[in-house]
Image (tube, grey):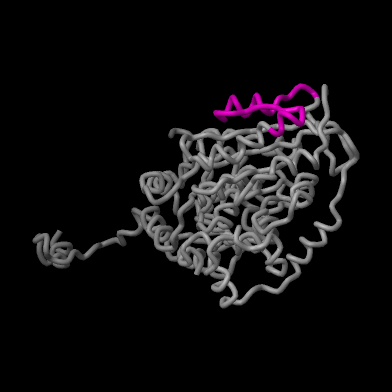
Amino acid sequence: MSGADSITPSRDASAPMIESAPVMSASWPAHVFHELQTARVVQVAYVPDAGHGELIDLCHADTAMRAVSLTTEEEGVAMLAGAWLGGQRGALLLQSSGVGNCINMLALNQECRIPLLALVTMRGEWGEFNPWQVPMGRSTGAALETAGVLAYRADAADDVAPTVRAAAALAFHSSRAVAVLIGQRVIGTKSFEK
Amino acid sequence: MTASLDRRAATARMLRDRGDALVVTGLGNPTYDVAAAGDTALNFYLWAAMGGAAMAGLGLALAQPHRRVLVVTGDGEMLMGLGSLATIGAEQPSNLGIVVLDNEHYGETGMQPAHTGRGVDLAGIAAATGFKLAVTVRTEAEVQSLAAQLFTVCRAALRRRQGLHIAEPDLAPRATAPTSAAAFAKHCSAPTPTAGEKARRGSSARPSDASPNSDCRLAKPALELRLLRHVPSSHHS
């Protein structure tokens, strides 16, 4: 198209590229990974999750990080509290359905003012195919807030990394539990066919 | 139950030669027993977060790979976190041990029976998840023999190893630790140290150099501040 040509001055590799769409949209997990590195997160605890799949792979591939697969999400809350006691920062990667599993364990963070950075991929909202995901998805934010966790949403791909950066700063500098809820619209809708 | 151990005495014996090992306790009597054995800022006492003791131990062990980390908890608490045995078994930390004070009952809530008294074998579960050493001890002699292993194995750091050591203490009524509990409350009510105080504490060489209760007035979380001495200050800005 002539229009596209007109905004692309050259195909020379040294020439600056002008993108028609933000690069970040396609790779928000890579940007989140960069934020975790920048925040000096070392221990990453997760329950396997498609939405966090790419980020989990990146964390496993980084020799400076220790990614630990859990049997249930509250294990991660306790593990990362131990990590903090030992001088390391951590992040918990979970799905909204796992938030409910964490509630009692969060007393640890609240009572001892131990920080928590939780990145929650949302289910039960945008285009959800599984009705059983809806109840926990609907109450995820409120449940976290009630349990003393500050919850922030990111509903556009470009917002995820900056929100994670802000959440990490808040968590680790103010010793508080902070969650980023990554909207299902960002992650993409799961279908029965997959 | 074929024999009985005095829970307090067994715990104290186990910890006698702990050196600078870090100890995480599970809620209820294990917290009180460990405190009674000698309160120190190297102990982190859970008063709730049931089911989380072993995993808090794992996170601490991964963060402090050159220190021995010991979790001391009860059978009810361990049963609530059974999945964590699988996670720890899969991770194979080289410096983590778990001691379960198994009285086959829920002491904190009125001595209701626990599954461990109904045929569930925690040592067997631990072995099945990949713990290299998983045993049940029932006599003082066995406790002594295990206590020797508990802290020497890791200090040598020669090989990957971890142990689940399960004592079977007696069924005496639960004992609270009012003195220790008061001390904990004091920790929790102390003012938050300033950045300067944190920095001064951070410059100390080793916690074991300080007398056990020298930091009685540490703000919560008391243990964290102690442990920070062992990491570059950049970890906590």
Q: Position of residue A192 (x, y in %)?
A: 48, 34
In the rendered view, would you say B162 is above or below A185?
Answer: above
Instruction: Give the residue at x 78% y 31%.
Output: B168
Residue B140, magenta (yes or no): yes
- Residue B229 is left or right of residue B107, and the answer is left
Instruction: Give the residue at x 45% y 66%.
Output: B234
Q: Is residue A168 visible?
A: yes
Q: Is residue A135 visible?
A: no
Q: How many marks?
A: 0
Q: Position of residue B131 (x, y in %)?
A: 57, 30
Image quadrant containing the N terminus of chain B: top right
Q: Nearer the viewer, residue B133 or B114?
A: B133
In the rendered view, would you say B179 is above or below B68?
Answer: below
Magenta stretch in the rendered image? B118-144
Q: Position of residue B95 (x, y in %)?
A: 54, 42
Q: Position of residue B28 (x, y in %)?
A: 79, 46
- Residue A104 is left or right of residue B131, and the answer is right
- Residue A152 is left or right of residue B27, and the answer is left
Residue B120, magenta (yes or no): yes
In the rendered view, would you say B125 is above or below B45?
Answer: above
Q: Quadrant of residue B201?
A: bottom right
Q: Nearer the viewer, residue A8 or B66?
A: B66
- Residue A28 is left or right of residue B1, and the answer is left
Instruction: Give the residue at x 63% y 46%.
Output: A74
Q: Nearer the viewer, residue B130 or A28?
A: B130
